[in-house]
Amino acid sequence: MNEAGRSAAREVAVKRDWTKGSVVRNLLSLSWPMVMQQVLYQLTMLVEMIWVGKLGIASIAAVGIGTLVFGLVMTALQGLAMGARALIARFIGAGDNEGAVHVARQAFI
């Protein structure tokens, strides 16, 4: 696909009205990156356990606790990101783009 075709496809995706059409199709279109992230995360955890399993029980326990802490931190960050997205969506829905930019900057910081 040439550069003009990619640019046009990107513009269509950005301006797409996600409230129209099949709800299931829209949800799948929006969620596939998160699904792939979770699949890759689980795959890395499996590979880690295979490698660490050769080192012994104490090493497996250490990786398990580290994974638990990492999971808690990631859950907190995802919750904050979800709240920021909700606020940004509200500001954009209200037509206040300046407020949406302010919230995005604050969330990034």
Image (cartoon, grey):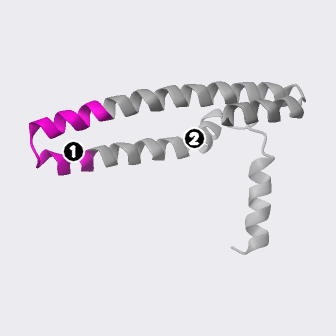
Residue at the limit of the structure toward the front, as seen here? 109
Picture coordinates of residue 68, whole percent (x, y): 33, 29
Task: Reply above or below: 86 against 31.
Answer: above
Callout 2: SS:
helix
**Image quadrant assignment for residue 70:** top left
User: Looking at numbered disc 2 in the image, what kind of residue is underneath it?
Assistant: Leu
Q: Quadrant of the C terminus?
A: top right
Prevailing SS of the magenta stretch: helix
Kindly identify which residue carries mark 1. Answer: 49
Label 2 CA crowd tier, 10 Å (few <14, some 14–19, many 20+)? few
**Image quadrant assignment for residue 7:** bottom right
Give the residues in magenta: 46-66
Residue 28 is marked as 2
Q: Nearer the viewer, residue 57 or 79?
A: 57
Q: Residue at x 32, y 48 (%)?
A: 43
Q: Are marks 2 and 1 in contact (CB under 8 Å)?
A: no
Callout 1: SS:
helix
Q: Residue at x 36, y 29 (%)?
A: 69
Picture coordinates of residue 41, whole percent (x, y): 39, 44
Q: Residue at x 56, y 25 (%)?
A: 79
User: Looking at numbered disc 1 in the image, what kind of residue is underneath it?
Assistant: Met
**Image quadrant assignment for residue 86:** top right
With 43 as the anchor, is 37 left or right in this view? right
Picture coordinates of residue 89, whole percent (x, y): 76, 29
Q: Any magenta on residue 64?
A: yes
Residue 96 is marked as none
With 6 as the anchor, is 36 left or right in this view? left
